[in-house]
Amino acid sequence: MKRTMRVSKLFFFVLIPAFGQQPVPIPEIKFESVPFLKITYDRNLGEVLGVAVNSKGHVVVLNHPGTGDLGAPVYGEATTQLLEYDEKGNFVRQLGKGVYGLAYAHSVRFDKYDNLWVVDKATMSVMKFNPEGIVVMNLGRRDEGPDEPRYRHANPPPVPVDAMFNGTTDVTWDSDDNIYVSDGYFNSEIAKFDKHGNWIKRWGSAGKGGEHANENPGQFSNPHNIGIDRSNNIYVADRGNRRIQVFDTEGNFKRFIFLNVPYDKTRHPVLGNRNPDPPDETAPWTICVTSGTPQYLYTSDTEPGRIYKLALPRGEILGTFGKSGHELGQFNWVHGLACPDENTLYVADMNNWRLQKIVMHPDKQKEAAILQQDKQKGTAGGR
């Protein structure tokens, strides 16, 4: 009862607008999943963890295939493949074959110069490939003993060491090309480097967000994805704490954003059994910030399996779409997003072993009404 009353007060504060207007319901965005990748029998995808799109429209798909002919549990492309496709979905090339830092890659991103960055959770490396596919920078260092990596066997995890990682998840850059790494699974912090790869600082620590995830800013429970907008606001998907945290480039906390749109809590999930006490705020896994004007942020959760469109910089939720499942247009753990424009998404549909290209058809009138209402009441709809 206490939990219910507290949530009710939260929604009253957030959703009741000024001037006696009725709150605008969060719209469900119309969308379609369109055919894209041309897959052949000898190039099936395994778990698709990441996707990135460069300025030419080429798409790099990070997936975890089987070991194939290699027969090795961890070795280069045996457990990580980086496959490049052109703007029409035709296969172009495989990147990173035999690269020492690849073992169990977690995310891929293109920077504004079309360099491809690969973040590897297992080797604790962040690698920069130039447009020709050559490694030109590595941050962090792979353990010498690959059979007993630190991040799996240490309990508690080792004390963080400057410029070293432990379970890295994602990477982004500010307007001065400084590099930010979400060092997610065990260090639970954000690492900052300059554009030359020199260590600058870290912020954050492992911790819980409280009963309703709105406490203890700067503490993380697996910062799983990271992104930055044109104003250098940094958005961190604090997955285990069911929130997005927003910081400036020095690590100063600015605000929380919550995915608190009502959903059917009785629906059976795509994996496992139904949670008898599901939370109101669902867990953000992904961050993707569009490059156009205005900018938007896309994020996703595992259950009910939705993708969310947010206005920046304040995080008003403008709409949602999708649900968990195995059919086309449904998702089974969205692990990575690429958003080349406001209405196009490439979705790393992890447990469905596929990439989906999504074309959205948003209701602009409803989005405008949400933003206008938020402006009038003087507080962010997503907090």
Image (cartoon, grey):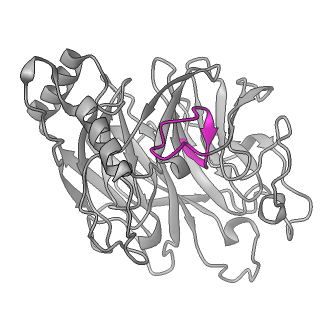
> Which of the image's four quarters has the N terminus?
bottom left
Q: x, y percentage for residue 236?
A: 53, 37
Q: Residue at x 12, y 27 (%)?
A: 369
Residue at point 74%, 83% (across, down): 71
Q: Is residue 225 left or right of residue 169?
A: left
The answer to if 214 sits in the magenta stretch is yes
Relative image position of residue 321 (x, y in whole percent) = 24, 52
Camera-nearest residue between 299 and 359: 299
Foreground of the two, 176 or 81: 176
Q: Which residues are magenta?
A: 208-225
Residue situated in front as seen by the camera: 345 or 81: 345
92 relative to 200, above or below: below
- In-image side of 274 versus 323 (left or right): right
For the point 25% across and 48% down, which residue is it? Answer: 320
Residue 73 location, quadrant:
bottom right
Magenta: main secondary structure: loop
Q: Position of residue 153 (x, y in %)?
A: 82, 65
